[in-house]
Every structure is written in C-alpha cells, then in structure tokens.
Amino acid sequence: MSLSTGREQGQCETMQQTNSFTRPAPFDGGGDGRTTIIRFAKLVGEGGEFPCVLREVGEDRLRVRLFGPLPMRVSPMELAFGDGETIAVMLIWQRGTEAGFRLCEQADRQRLLCPQGPYEKRAIRVAVAVPSHVHALSGTQDVTIRNLSHEGACILCAAHFAIDQRLKLAIPELGDVVATVRWRKQREYGLAFVETFRFEAMARAVRVMQQQAGGDAGENYGEDA
C-alpha cells in the first residue's frame, strides 16, 4: 500500500468514528485504483432528487446504488452529500439498482471518500412535493411535505403549530410518524422524528412518493463502466 493510500485510509477511519452517515470500507487492493465505500448521498438534476449510496470510486468514474430507476433526462447531475459537498457527474450507464457516472471535472478524491464540507453531521434531505396530513390535538390538517430525511421533514401548512408541539405526520411507506416541531418560518415547519429511520427506509419512501407523482424513468441505459 502506498503512503498516500495509507493516509487516505487513516483519515477515513477517523471520520468513520465521528460521522454515522458515512462508513468507508477498506481499500479493495485492486490494481485499477478503485475504492469500495458506503456513503449516503443524493443525485440532483432536472428530473428531481434521488437518494443513493456511493459504492465505488475510481480515478474518473464512480458507481452508486439506486432505490429506483433514474429518468433518462437527468444527466448531467450533481452528487450531493450531507456535509454540503457537491460533485458534478454524468450518467453513463444504468442497470437495475446500480448506475455508473463519469466525473465532469477533476475532483479531489478525499471529497468523495470523507466529509469535507461545513455540515459534517447533517442528514441527507431529499426535496419532494407531496400532499399529506398531520394529526394534532386541534385535529387533522392538510400539509405538503417539502423535504424528507431519515431524521425529520419540512412541511408546509396553513395551520399554526407551537415549537416543541408533537404531531403525527402521514408519510407514504412509513405510516404515521411521531414528530416534534423544531422550527417554523411563516407557513413552513421543520419536524424532527421522535424515532429516526434507516436511510434505506427513507429512500424507499421517497421512491413511492415519486411514483405517485408520476414521471418517466428507464430501467437500463448506456454501457457499463
């Protein structure tokens, strides 16, 4: 193992202890310069936002795990992490629950392997626009879910809720989720779930919301990297 490779691995092991959302695996030892990793992210493009898991990083390409097929029009896209880092990527192939991307520009390998941005412990928030409802002591109120993470959600509602008030938010695939109001800004409310979910559960819920909203997507695309 080279000195630079050992330094990268050591930095990632330190990061693994401080950030529960990113768990890099050891270097695979292959001769092609690829690194296996498990890092939660989302793909952002004209077709929307799509939660994913970064699984492999090469010199100029990467592979991600998807939770549903991507629309064909989404490339180019941005790969965005919870720490605030974004990397421009181009879709080159898609097979079932996996997709390969090419980096649009030379990127620091450490930006992909370890948190570098200003929000190291922030969860991935996926933008949606889904009508739903909340149950409160005052009754049931219609809301629109604006974004969703495995820790909470942002909703839009005409009703007034107090800070620290308990609500039950109806989320497709997840059911009625107990949450606490953490902040409000005019008609927007930030909710923190009393019990958090696994990233995969949140990603599946987002996929159901996208299916309900419609939209075109293709199962296979391009050539394997």
Image (cartoon, grey):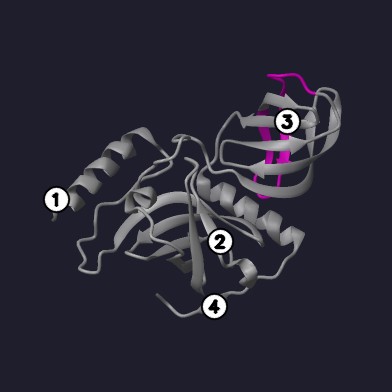
CA gap, disc 1 and disc 3: 48 Å
Q: Mark 2 or mark 3: which is in front?
A: 2
Residue 27: where, in percent of width, then height? 24, 56
The dot on residue 3 is 1
Q: Which callout, 4 or 2, points to the residue nearer the camera?
A: 2
Task: Measure how far apart labels 2 and 3 are at the Cα level.
Answer: 28 Å
| Spatial separation of the CA atoms under disc 4 and disc 2 | 15 Å
| Residue 189 badge | 3
The type of residue carrying mark 2 is Met
- Cα separation between marks 4 and 1: 38 Å
Is residue 89 visible to us here?
yes
Q: CA distance from mark 1 to mark 2?
A: 33 Å
Q: Which marked residue is nearer to the observer: mark 4 or mark 1?
A: 1
Q: Which residues are magenta?
A: 161-179
- The answer to which of marks 4 and 3 sits earlier in the sequence is 3
Q: Residue at x 66, y 61 (%)?
A: 46
Tell me which label, 2 or 3, sits earlier in the chain. 2
Do the residues bearing badges 4 and 3 touch, measured as CB atoms within 8 Å? no
Q: Residue furthest bottom?
A: 223
Mark nearer the N terminus (4 vs 1): 1
Residue at 44%, 39% (x, y): give it: 117
Give the residue at mark 2.
77
The N terminus - image quarter: bottom left
- Say whether disc 1 or disc 2 marks the residue closer to the N-terminus: 1
Q: Pick whichever of labels 1 and 3 is earlier in the sequence.
A: 1
